[in-house]
């Protein structure tokens, strides 16, 4: 019989809790370590839709990337959004395990999965820890150079679709061969991407001012901004493979394909049928 504790042991070997940032909240959020596990659901976000999916699908454990209770709480009453999820999980005997910045920094980790999805051969760590073997982000190479416009299309094809789509910033004809990636929100690593000397940097949640200042820097890589959720979803297959390798056919491992990106629609002025001059 495989237990929650057995699954946690395998996951923490792959994504050591010591790699997590000091502000992070990782590990077993709720659930009895001694409870048996026959089915696991792997997802990015522990939200209402993925909890529904786990309960309806008969899973005993959810493995999520994002923490449910990242900030300190003083209670989890059932009439609050996160409290209601905790109560539902407990009532249905579904455990929740989260691997966040420890999965970001692990080798392999979130950015390795993103790099693989795009078709990169990983060559290094974008922001390494002191040990030189772990850290946030990766650098890599494409099999051959391609124009930036084609590279942006490559990224869009490689990742699950979101309402906001994939945005590029840079010369559309610029040849792209070397690339830095960071799953999740990565504008805090713009300087590292420039120092790495890569041609392009792929990440999520890029903001207006940091992106603009970055592009004004000599030698800065072109930018590809993807959805936060989309950039981290490839990790789900990585985590699922680790569990399948650890437990063979004894545990059913399922990857959620539900889009939990918060944005549900996007449009342009032209599509909306309106004409307005900025000013």
Image (tube, helix red, strand yellow):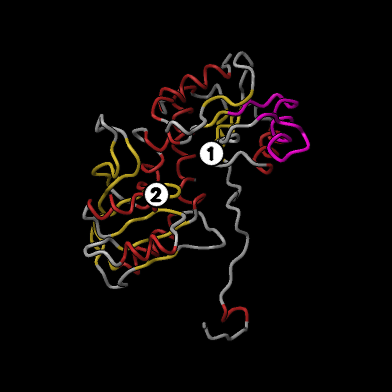
Residue 107 horizontal side relative to residue 259, left or right: left
CB atoms at circles 2 and 1 under 8 Å apart? no
Q: Residue 77: say if magenta.
A: yes
Residues 40 and 28: in front is: 28
Mark 2 Cα shell of 10 Å, populated few (<14), some (14-19), many (≥20): some
Task: Please give the range of residues in magenta.
Answer: 74-96
Task: Residue 217 in the image: state x and y as whole percent.
Answer: 26, 64
Q: Residue 210: say if magenta.
A: no
Give the labeled residue for mark 2: 117
Label 2 – label 1 distance at C-alpha: 20 Å
Q: How many marks?
A: 2
Residues 40 and 275: in front is: 275
Residue 82 horizontal side relative to residue 33, left or right: right
Residues 235 and 224: in front is: 224
Residue 152 horizontal side relative to residue 268, left or right: left
Residues 62 and 56: in front is: 62
Q: Indicate which disc, 2 or 1, sits on the residue closer to the N terminus.
A: 1
Name the residue at 25% across, 52% down.
141
Numbered circle sitting on residue 138: none
Name the residue at 49% across, 24% down.
248
Residue 243 horizontal side relative to residue 68, left or right: left
**Label 1: element kind:** loop
Give the labeled residue for mark 1: 66
């Amino acid at each position: 019989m495989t237990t929650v504790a057995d699954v946690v042991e395998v996951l923490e070997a792959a994504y050591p809790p010591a790699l997590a940032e000091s502000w992070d909240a990782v590990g077993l959020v709720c659930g009895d370590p001694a409870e048996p596990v026959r089915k696991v659901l792997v997802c990015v976000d522990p939200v209402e839709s993925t909890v529904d999916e786990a309960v309806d699908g008969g899973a005993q454990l959810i493995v999520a990337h994002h923490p449910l209770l990242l900030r300190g709480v003083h209670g989890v009453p059932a009439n609050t959004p996160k409290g209601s999820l905790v109560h539902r999980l407990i009532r249905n005997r579904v455990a929740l395990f989260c691997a966040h910045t420890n999965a970001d920094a692990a080798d392999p980790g979130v950015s390795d999965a993103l790099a693989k999805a795009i078709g990169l051969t990983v060559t290094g760590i974008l922001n390494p820890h002191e040990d030189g073997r772990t850290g946030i982000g990766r650098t890599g190479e494409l099999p051959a150079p391609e124009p930036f416009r084609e590279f942006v299309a490559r990224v869009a094809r490689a990742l699950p679709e979101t309402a906001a789509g994939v945005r590029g910033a840079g010369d559309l004809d610029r040849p792209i061969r070397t690339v830095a990636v960071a799953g999740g929100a990565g504008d805090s690593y713009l300087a590292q991407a420039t120092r790495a000397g890569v041609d392009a940097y792929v990440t999520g949640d890029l903001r207006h001012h940091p992106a603009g200042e970055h592009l004004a820097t000599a030698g800065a890589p072109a930018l590809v901004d993807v959805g936060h959720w989309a950039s981290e979803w490839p990790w789900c297959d990585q985590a699922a493979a680790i569990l399948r390798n650890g437990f063979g056919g004894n545990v059913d491992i399922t990857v959620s394909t539900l889009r939990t990106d918060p944005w549900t629609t996007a449009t342009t002025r032209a599509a909306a049928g309106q004409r307005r001059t900025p000013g």
